[in-house]
Image (spheres, helix red, strand yellow):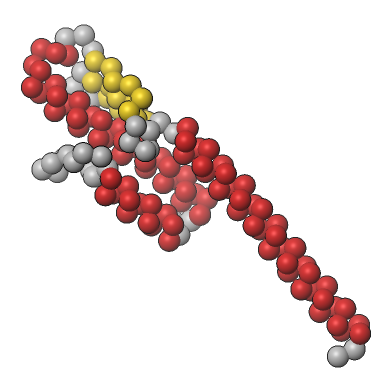
């Protein structure tokens, strides 16, 4: 190998390393953006009958519970309505983060698939026979 060929090979390797560094920086920036977005994401959901409005975060944290006047007329059904509305708000908030992850990492990303599985486990769809504690 001539010294010119060696210099070209070294230059190509350096260019490849520079490209990988640039890509790593971009991924780090996207990761930071996703983290910030996830920490700020909230979803507000109102029950079908309009009696209960819940704001939740994708972590499951409840930011607020608002009841409309007259909501307590039937306390037994109000409890069920609150629980179901909380579950829907938690799920919607988590799904918003998943959409953002899919847009950044791609729908076929293994990380997105793992997070989706975690969301499905932590926040099952409302309408089944039970709503589990999250």
Total numbered circles: 0
Q: Quadrant of the C terminus?
A: top left
Mark yes or no: residue 113 visible: yes
Residue at the (51%, 42%) spot, across then down: 35
Q: Residue furthest top?
A: 69
Residue placed most toward the observer, 1 or 107 = 1
- Residue 78 image offset from top left, x and y in percent: 14, 21
Residue 19 falls left or right of residue 109: right
Residue at the (36%, 25%) spot, across then down: 63
Task: Check the image and report above or below for 48 versus 35.
Answer: above
Residue at the (47%, 36%) spot, across then down: 39
- Residue 60 image offset from top left, x and y in percent: 33, 36
Residue 51 falls left or right of residue 17: left
- Residue 61 image offset from top left, x and y in percent: 34, 32
Task: Check the image and report above or below for 118 versus 95.
Answer: below
Mark yes or no: residue 48 visible: no
Residue at the (32%, 28%) spot, across then down: 62
Residue placed most toward the observer, 75 or 47 = 75
Residue 67 falls left or right of residue 113: left
Task: Check the image and report above or below for 50 versus 86.
Answer: above
Q: Quadrant of the N terminus?
A: bottom right
- Residue 42 image offset from top left, x and y in percent: 40, 31
Q: Residue furthest right?
A: 3
């Amino acid at each position: 190998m001539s010294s010119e060929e060696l210099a070209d090979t070294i230059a190509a390797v350096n260019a490849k390393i520079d490209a990988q560094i640039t890509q790593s920086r971009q991924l780090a920036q996207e990761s930071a953006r996703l983290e910030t977005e996830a920490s700020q994401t909230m979803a507000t959901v109102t029950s079908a009958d309009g009696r209960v409005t819940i704001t939740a975060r994708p972590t499951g944290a409840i930011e607020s519970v608002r009841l409309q006047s007259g909501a307590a007329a039937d306390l037994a059904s109000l409890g069920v309505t609150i629980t179901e509305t909380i579950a829907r708000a938690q799920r919607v908030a988590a799904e918003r983060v998943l959409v953002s992850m899919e847009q950044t990492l791609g729908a076929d990303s293994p990380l997105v698939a793992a997070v989706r599985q975690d969301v499905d486990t932590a926040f099952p769809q409302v309408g089944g026979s039970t709503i589990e504690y999250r």
